[in-house]
Image (cartoon, rainbow, N blue to C red):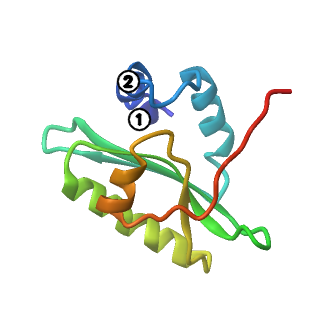
Amino acid sequence: MAEIQRCVPFEQKIRDKGRDDTKISDMLYSIKFLISNPQFGFWIAYDDRGEVIGYFSALITIFPGAKRLNLLRIYAKQREVFEAFEKVGGEFAKEWGVKIIAMIAKGHIKAFRRRHGFKVVSVNMEKEL
């Protein structure tokens, strides 16, 4: 968890840009709960000086009709790091026999389609309880 907490400044920047409204404390609690689950992964990339330059978290679901690798967060300062995380995610998915990678995008949908090959297949809907 100490290493994961080194990613918090990047998470704060994501929130400052309006790309996520989840409380960081809630995110950290979820990670702490999931970290022992073999279907959850959290990877961190470092530069030569040991500074965090990216991180990636994902959760495998194997429910019928929803078997997929769910990207929870992928943050990378460099394209090469992003591509390395894509490979790691693909390998993780294959370990579970998963062939679909899914994500929820709050914005920049065109960029995810163009730059990363995602396509819109459904719309998430919500209502408050």
First reached walking from the N terminus: tag 1 or tag 2: 1
Query: Residue 106 at x, y = what percent?
Result: 50, 39
Image quadrant in which you'd find residue 8: top left
Image coords of residue 86 (percent x, y): 37, 64
Q: What residue lies at 25% left-to-right and 54% top-to-bottom?
A: 81
To which residue does mark 1 refer?
3
Residue at 72 percent across and 69 percent down: it is 62
Identify which residue, 13 or 56, lies in the foreground: 13
Circle 2: residue type: Lys
| In this picture, residue 119 sits left or right of residue 87 | right
**Label 1 to label 2, Cα distance in Å?**
23 Å
Tag nearer the camera, 1 or 2: 2
- Residue corresponding to mark 2: 17
- Residue 32, given in percent of the width and then of the height, sits at 62, 36
Does 1 appear above or below 15? below
In the rendered view, tell whether residue 89 sits above or below residue 27: below
> What x and y, as percent, mark residue 90?
45, 71
| Quadrant including the C terminus | top right
